[in-house]
Amino acid sequence: MSAETSSSAPISPAASSPAPSSPAPSSPHAALDVSALDDVRANEELAWLAASIAKHDAAYFNDDAPHISDAAYDALKRRNSAIEARFPALIRADSPSKRVGAAPAEGFGKVTHPVPMLSLGNAFDDQDVHDFVTSVRRFLTLDAAAPLTFTAEPKIDGVSIAVRYERGRFVQAATRGDGQVGENVTANVATIDAIPAKLKGKDVPDVIEVRGEIYMGDDDFAALNAAQADAGQKVFANPRNAAAGSLRQLDAKITATRPLRFFAYTWGEVSTLPADTQAGVVAAFASWGLPTNPDMAVCEDADALIAYYRAIEARRSALGYDIDGIVYKVDALAYQDRLGLRSRAPRWAIAHKFAAEQAITTLNAIEIQVGRTGALTPVAKLAPVTVGGVVVSNATLHNEDEIARKDIRVGDTVVVQRAGDVIPQVVQVVTEKRPGESAAFVFPTRCPVCGSEAVRPVDVKTGDQDVVRRCTGGLICPAQAKERLKHFVSRNAVEIDGLGDKQIDLFYDEGLLRQPADIYTLAERDAARPSDERLAARKGYGNRSIEKLFTSIEERRKIPLDRFIFGLGIRHVGEQTARDLAAAYTSFARFREAVEGAVAGMPSAAYERFVHLPGLGLKTAESAFKAIAASAEDLQRLAGSEGATIETLLTGLKLVPPKAAGTLARAFDEAPVLIEAACEAARGAPGADYIELTNLDGIGATVSDALVAFFREAHNVEALDALLEQVEVTPFAARTAVASNVSGKTVVFTGTLQTMGRSEAKARAERLGAKVASSVSKKTDYVVAGADAGSKLTKAEQLGVEVLSEDAWTALTGGA
Ligand code: IVH
């Protein structure tokens, strides 16, 4: 690794075991400011720096005997970056800045996070904070007297980053990306002064991935924007965008010139943790030379967290950097471990958001958008206005009832609000400013895209009209079809790179894509066309981008079950529900069989109406309609007799308790109507498969009904079958499940458990690959009975399901 250049100067004879403050060894032109260098001098110095840094690396990595202090080493790297930034043409092939995984020329490489990068749940008010603390205590089964501490710290509005150190040396940095896979921004992060090239201290683990936020201070942001404006370059909307834009530069030399800062606040992969509390680990970060937030505090309860929140909120504008809330974390790492995560967010942390920021502007128009499930969503088109540092020109109006309630009219002056990353909303109208002529907004009753009727169905259970009006066009409606396609290819579903909203709109309009299956035949159909008509021949495309698109499509012919189910875009089936379903059924065939079974066993509207009669309750309602249906003939006959009322008939034959008879008499006008309804309810009672589906933990009737509704539509089933011809759905492999002797088993917990709360028991069982159900059936493998177990235990005994004590369960699952 010796430098082949005549101008390389000898490394200054620095002490072999240097004090941390040892001076930087001087380069040939160290006395000159970078701005004072000319080409020749810059070239000489880059050569010297390359050789020098290489020697220090060798001394450190190979001989474990550094020649210079960390600060001096960092100073060399910085000087090198600064010169390279000014003289990009002189960057050497052996440049030290290229050594750590530089970004490939045409974009950033991908980095799979060894430990996923999570997001946080939100708290919006004090009650949410109390609820958070209560739920943590409940999960851990801590009584009110047991101590439980939390850390509290500002939530930085920047870009999250994972910075990997091996043997104390910076080796890699990656953005969050989708939480599983991020972008390799090593070369960029290497230029940030706040992120040391080397960690100091004796207790630095062999491997530690430090995570935190890269951000830009308010003053630096203002100065950068001023300079950008002077140079006729893009100005940034806010410090967060400026930080993100500066970091994601393909040319790291640009990043080097930007004033980026960093706070370390959590970690990913780590070989050994330096402490057993959150606060302890962050203190260790600081001792290793990483910047940590000086305002972090430890609090004993919800009131203390809230007091901390208020105190920081009061100082918010004086902090010098943007924050959008406070993050609370359970301090004890052992508790964090037990709490684990739900979906993509940990149970042990929460972000308490600051109140929304508001602004006033004009409502120019109300546009109706049609979503994937046909929902007609009104969107406010606004005169652009800055709200909390972001320019807003669209805002949600929620639904037609909201527009009516707030009497929002086109031309109105309105108050717009935006909180964190949520969609801006129109809060109210400034009525004093309403123009003389204006008319109440009339919500369309036809789909603005396909013209089909748009309806607000009545919920059979509650009798209420749905707040959302929906287009009845299904896949006939281009808007719904496009949105479904977009959802199918989206990042958390099947994730097809290069097939963005723009392409889908275009391909759909041209008739190239109508349903997901078409995506997989696109390349073949394209190749069959004359070459001048192919996609690659289009303006704005080109061979390479089309090739890339076809490759990413091919890469997605195998789709993991959870992503596939999510990708189908079924109402109420979000990512977590899709995962729950995938975990429960493990293969698409089993999932489909279960839902098709449920389609046949879906309760009828008459059944739903009966069991939701106010004041009746499920059990009474079921026994009532069964009894009435069984005696239908007798009742019909008696109903004709003089003076017979519903009440006298029912109580006379002792078919239902007197109170229920009263309820039924109020709900139905005449006996024959009641009898008819009861017979229909009895015929339409839910079948075993339907009950099974709704009993899955985390599923319930809403999701089951949505699944059934989806599979009942012939056009959905056709589209699904066509898709299955093209793709292979791979069985669900629980990311965290470990092989155990309960994997694949169905477990029901009942009674009070001693060693852990119900939620923790459930989370643990699921980690071990078991399926947790809420009620006992023939398909239950184990019932784990704690103290005071009641009807579920009885049912298990009746059905001959194996009953385990909590100890037996713990033993079966290999201890805590
Ligand atoms: S902790 C598992 N602490 O907020 C918890 N996050 O909404 C990981 N963020 O992606 C995050 N300041 O980028 C944590 N003091 C802080 C934070 C913080 C900002 C960001 C982070 C994360 C996002 C979640």
Image: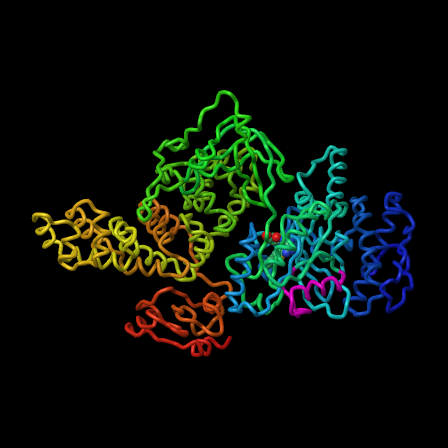
Location of residue 43 in the rendering, given as x and y in whole percent from the top left corner: 85, 48
Q: Using residue 203 as the reference point, say whether residue 574 is left or right of it.
A: left
- The residue nearer to you, when weighing 301 against 219, is 301
Q: Quadrant of residue 270?
A: bottom right
- The quadrant the N terminus occupies is bottom right
Look at the picture and state if 764 lies above or below 497: below
Location of residue 464 in the rendering, given as x and y in whole percent from the top left corner: 34, 43
- The residue nearer to you, when weighing 510 against 116, is 116
Look at the picture and state if 38 lies above or below 687: above
Q: Quadrant of residue 625?
A: bottom left
Q: Which residues are magenta?
A: 266-289
- The residue nearer to you, when weighing 285 against 567, is 285
Q: Is residue 158 visible?
A: no
Look at the picture and state if 669 lies above or below 412: below
Picture residue at 75% right of the left edge, 43% below the top: 219
Look at the picture and state if 780 lies above or below 187: below
Tell which quarter ligand 1 is in. bottom right
Magenta stretch holds residue 277: yes
